């Protein structure tokens, strides 16, 4: 537990843990020219920040949503899959929850591109406090750090977490102590924890408070990554780390910055780095840089988890997924996602150049994700936990009152950069829905070519086909139609093996499948014709290693040695045609994804020297 807690500190809390670097600075920024440094405004802002963190992060995510784990996995797609199991099949909500899950995952993708850029830039910009002459080096240094961060991803979140965990302990203790140094001489700032100051701010200056909420949301960025990363470390380590270290230290630092601003209004130019003495500014820049690298790690790890969930749920093509831990199946590395994020982050850094400019684009994707996650959670709570309506209304009002305000306040950012995460989300959502629709169309065409399996087995009994010794495993989606490779092997080679097993790898709507549910055997009605079906059930977080899973067949008395069998893959080559169902540009998008999908032999961990690929073409 202690090891996982340290690992969670090094991966999960980096994003929200570095929010003090830029959140209050942005709220009091001269660009806004609206939130003043008066006693009333400062206390009101600190109260807003504290209660936003308390309600959205502590209550919503840590207390409630972490309970809605999908067999240990988190993220809005996992929550959507969980909710879909609970609602009535075929109803409107059955389809709606997955659509909301896809949109939420898409918004998270937009956030995943912006977070590394703004986090690292905000830390390196601290160089300008002790050494203004280094201003021109901020961007090159930030880009170098990003390059290193994405290169080390292949070593896995376990290694990264163990490396960064101690750093984050030092970070949180340090920012807590820095806050205390300003709270002790000005203890009155503690009164800002009262919600009355936030309410007074709203009632006395409603328009200014509304504008401020557009930047207050920066204090809770990373909450969605906290849930998405749950599969890497588990619920308990995340909760312990949050309540015993992260939340108290964040609160102390925000209070300290508020005290500093009340006594020195000029400190709004960079209240975080001006908290400490001048001699500590250089060490704080270095520590902050390390912490923001870890902040980036939180969303990158979350992006890996979300991408694999989308692939297993049928919204993305096969991805090359590398496992980086022998003990935690959720700790993965996806090269295509890693390098796509890398390119996106570098483009943003070169385009926006400063964290202040990026802050205008930040927040809209986060608030959209927050609202969608609340909706999915309430659907699940009603369907699975059977919550009473009064409880749903109470919790819904508590969450939506803050999150919809955040969303409305950030809508003004659309024309000032907020279009960027929305554009990224739109591209990702379009890609996912296109793949889902295209795969459905191609699957229908494929079934027509394959023909009924029972009819093909009857055909084999009446024709002259040579039976050769050995075992053939044909990977195929189901036991209703004939694997194309099976049909083509008989048609061109006029042979079949003594024992033929049609193996279907099925992705279940759960993250992990119990060992006793892994394998289901069927003789297809005749145990003597040499053709049988095996269904392998995998969760959407399980490694689909077919030979390893088939070892369970021998334990059930099935004559199948996966180390001696020959594996046959049916390949469908998809070509552009005139079939209706998708527009031309979406067909091109689907074809591009299909041609770049992971090699199924590698995906299913099949041995290269005993794998044969055969198939046909389809035009759609």
Image: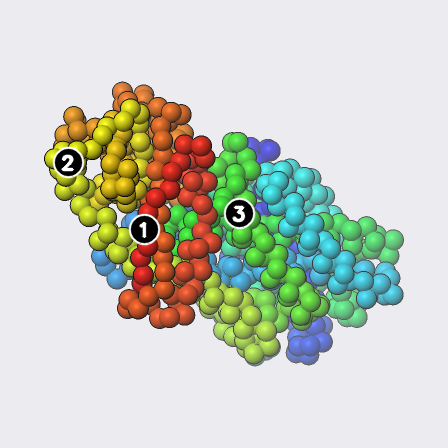
Percent coordinates x, y for residue 310 in the rendering: 42, 52
Residue at screen point 41% across, 60% down: 591
Q: Point out the tag, 2 or 1, that comes first from the N-terminus.
A: 2
- Looking at the rendering, in which quadrant would you find the C terminus? bottom left
| Quadrant hosting residue 603 | top left
Give the mark toward the camera: 1 or 3: 1
Tell me if 365 is positioned left or right of 88 in this view.
right
Question: Which colouring convention does the figure follow?
Answer: rainbow
Percent coordinates x, y for residue 293 in the rendering: 67, 51
| SS class, disc 1 | strand
Quick check: can you spot residue 164?
yes
| SS class, disc 3 | loop
Res. 334 mark = 3
Q: Which residue is mark 2?
A: 463
Circle 2 packing at 10 Å, graded few (<14), some (14-19), many (20+), is: few
Residue at screen point 78% across, 67% down: 267
């Amino acid at each position: 537990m202690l090891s996982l807690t340290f690992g969670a500190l090094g991966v999960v809390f980096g994003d929200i843990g570095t929010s003090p670097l830029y959140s209050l600075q942005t709220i009091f920024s001269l660009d806004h020219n609206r939130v003043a440094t008066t006693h009333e405004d400062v206390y009101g802002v600190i109260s807003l920040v504290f209660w936003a963190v308390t309600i959205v992060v502590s209550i919503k995510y840590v207390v409630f949503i972490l309970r809605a784990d999908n067999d240990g996995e988190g993220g809005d797609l996992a929550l959507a899959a969980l909710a879909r199991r609970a609602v009535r099949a075929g109803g409107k909500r059955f389809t709606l929850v997955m659509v909301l899950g896809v949109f939420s995952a898409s918004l998270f993708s937009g956030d995943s591109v912006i977070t590394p850029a703004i986090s690292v830039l905000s830390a390196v910009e601290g160089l300008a406090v002790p050494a203004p002459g280094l201003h021109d080096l901020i961007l090159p240094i930030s880009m170098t750090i990003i390059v290193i961060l994405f290169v080390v991803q292949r070593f896995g979140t376990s290694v990264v977490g163990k490396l960064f965990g101690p750093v984050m302990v030092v970070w949180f203790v340090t920012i807590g102590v820095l806050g205390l140094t300003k709270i002790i001489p000005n203890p009155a700032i503690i009164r800002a924890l009262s919600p009355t100051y936030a309410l007074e701010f709203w009632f006395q200056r409603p328009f200014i408070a509304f504008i401020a909420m557009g930047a207050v949301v920066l204090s809770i960025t990373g909450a969605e990554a906290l849930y998405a990363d749950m599969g890497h470390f588990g619920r308990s380590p995340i909760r312990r780390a949050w309540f015993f270290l992260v939340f108290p230290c964040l609160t102390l630092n925000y209070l300290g910055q508020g005290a500093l601003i009340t006594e020195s209004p000029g400190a709004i130019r960079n209240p975080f780095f001006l908290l400490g003495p001048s001699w500590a500014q250089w060490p704080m820049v270095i520590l902050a840089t390390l912490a923001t690298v870890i902040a980036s790690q939180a969303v990158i790890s979350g992006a890996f988890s979300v991408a694999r969930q989308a692939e297993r749920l049928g919204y993305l093509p096969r991805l090359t997924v590398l496992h980086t831990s022998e003990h935690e199946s959720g700790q993965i590395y996806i090269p295509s996602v890693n390098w796509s994020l890398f390119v996106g982050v570098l483009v943003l850094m070169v385009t926006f150049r400063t964290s202040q400019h990026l802050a205008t684009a930040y927040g809209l994707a986060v608030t959209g994700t927050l609202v969608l996650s609340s909706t999915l959670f309430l659907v699940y709570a009603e369907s699975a936990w059977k919550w009473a309506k009064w409880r749903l209304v109470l919790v819904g009002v508590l969450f939506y009152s803050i999150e919809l305000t955040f969303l409305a306040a950030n809508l003004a950012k659309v024309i000032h950069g907020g279009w960027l995460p929305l554009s990224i989300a739109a591209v990702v959502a379009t890609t996912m829905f296109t793949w889902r629709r295209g795969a459905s169309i191609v699957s229908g065409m494929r079934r027509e070519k394959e023909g009924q399996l029972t009819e093909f087995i009857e055909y084999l009994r009446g024709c002259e086909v040579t039976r050769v010794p050995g075992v053939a495993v044909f990977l195929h989606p189901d036991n209703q139609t004939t694997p194309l490779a099976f049909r083509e092997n008989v048609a061109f080679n006029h042979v079949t093996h003594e024992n033929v097993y049609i193996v279907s790898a099925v992705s279940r709507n759960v993250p992990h499948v119990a060992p006793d549910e892994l394998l289901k055997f069927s003789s297809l009605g005749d145990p003597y014709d040499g053709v049988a079906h095996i269904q392998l059930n995998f969760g959407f977080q399980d490694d689909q290693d077919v030979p390893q899973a088939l070892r369970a067949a021998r334990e059930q008395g099935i004559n199948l040695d996966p180390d001696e069998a020959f594996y046959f893959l049916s390949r469908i080559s998809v070509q552009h045609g005139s079939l209706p169902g998708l527009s031309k540009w979406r067909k091109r998008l689907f074809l591009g994804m299909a041609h770049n999908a992971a090699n199924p032999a590698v995906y299913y961990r099949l041995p290269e020297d005993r794998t044969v690929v055969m198939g046909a073409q389809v035009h759609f």
